[in-house]
Amino acid sequence: MEKSIRREANVERSFCKRLREAGCLVYKFVSPGNDGVPDRIVVTPGGRVIFVELKTERGKLEPIQKFQIGRLKEHEQDVRVLYGANEVDRFVVDVLEGGL
């Protein structure tokens, strides 16, 4: 397994665990026939729905991911791209503090 893939998997595992502990619903987003959709759908205890794409610090969005994120934003959806553990930490803190 490539090192960056392992790091991304570790970031994703921590992301899911911490948000679930905070009372969020965290779903893996798979949409057959729609490559490039964000990795996760997060539903906060307050009812907010957030689509989240997780990347390593050096990760880059593929063109299809940019397209899918754009489509969601055109439909007024909250979409976040989080790069690495530090951005995941900030996102989780925002959820815990009710800032989202």
Image: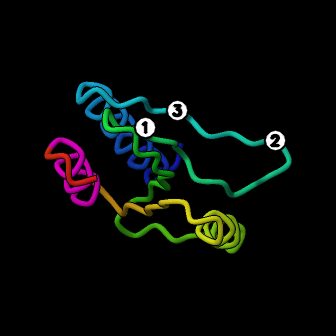
Q: Which mark is residue 82?
A: none
Q: Position of residue 7 (x, y in %)?
A: 38, 48
Q: Position of residue 23 (x, y in %)?
A: 28, 26
The reply to whether the magenta stretch includes residue 66 is no
Dot in front, 1 or 2? 1
User: Which of the 4 image quarters holds residue 10?
Assistant: top left
Around disc 2, counting alpha carbons within 10 Å, would you say few (fewer than 14), some (14 to 19), or many (20 or more)? Answer: few
Task: Classify residue 69 as left or right of residue 84.
Answer: right
Classify 10 Å Cα crowding around label 1: few (below 14), some (14-19), many (20 and above).
some
Where 37 falls versus 69 (above or below)?
Answer: above
**As rendered, which of 51 and 56 lies closer to the eye?**
51
Residue ID for mark 2: 32
Q: Earlier in the sequence, mark 3 or mark 2?
A: 3
Question: Residue at 21% across / 54% down in the picture?
Answer: 99
76 or 51, nearer to the observer: 76
Work out how far the residue at label 3 is from the one at label 2, CA to CA, in angstroms.
Answer: 15 Å
What's under tag 2, amino acid-wise? Pro
Mark 1 element type = strand
Q: Which residue is mark 3?
A: 27
Residue matched to label 1: 43
Q: Residue furthest right?
A: 33
